[in-house]
Amino acid sequence: MSFYPHTYRSQRSPVAIIALIFFLCVVGYGVFELRGVLSGPRLTILEPDEWSVSTSSLIIIRGTAPQMSKLALNGRQIFTDEKGSFVEELLLPDGYSILELVATDRLNRTVTKQLHIYNQ
């Protein structure tokens, strides 16, 4: 004769299941939001090309640098909008110029891009 007429089965309450699902959603959302910080700095130059020839002394540099704390063009700080986009005008001397863009994030990681421009 058995004291347990039915096999023992663990039953979780619906409240515990809902709490577990909520916790997993919160953790998943936190990891999703941290992906920008964890992936490191990004710098994209949209205009001009990395190697280009210009017939005008005035060039316009466009690009994006999302989630950066500092962006510099040849050592001079430039600013981005809230989406990380930037537009910078620059007067170039005649001849060959190398422009260096350096983006730094909050963790002090940097990414550098160079533009080689020949001004005729």
Image (cartoon, grey):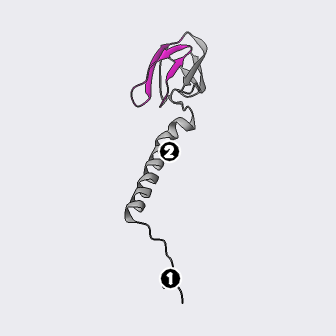
Task: First in sequence, mark 2 or 1: give its number.
Answer: 1
- Picture quadrant of residue 107: top right
Q: Is residue 46 left or right of residue 112?
A: left
Residue drawn where x is 44% and y is 47% of the image: 29
How far apart marks 2 and 1 lie (CA) works out to 45 Å
Contact, mark 2 vs mark 1 (Cβ under 8 Å): no
* Viewer-closest of 112 and 87: 112
Q: Give, as a single range, the part of the protein colored magenta.
A: 67-92
Give the residue number, with chain letter if any, for mark 1: 4
Quarter of the image where the N terminus is located: bottom right
Give the residue number, with chain letter if any, for mark 2: 31
Label 1, residues with CA under 10 Å away: few <14, some 14-19, many ≥20 = few
- Residue 13 screen position, x and y as percent: 40, 66
Relative to 45, is 20 above or below? below
Residue drawn where x is 51% and y is 83% of the image: 3
Relative to 10, is 90 above or below? above
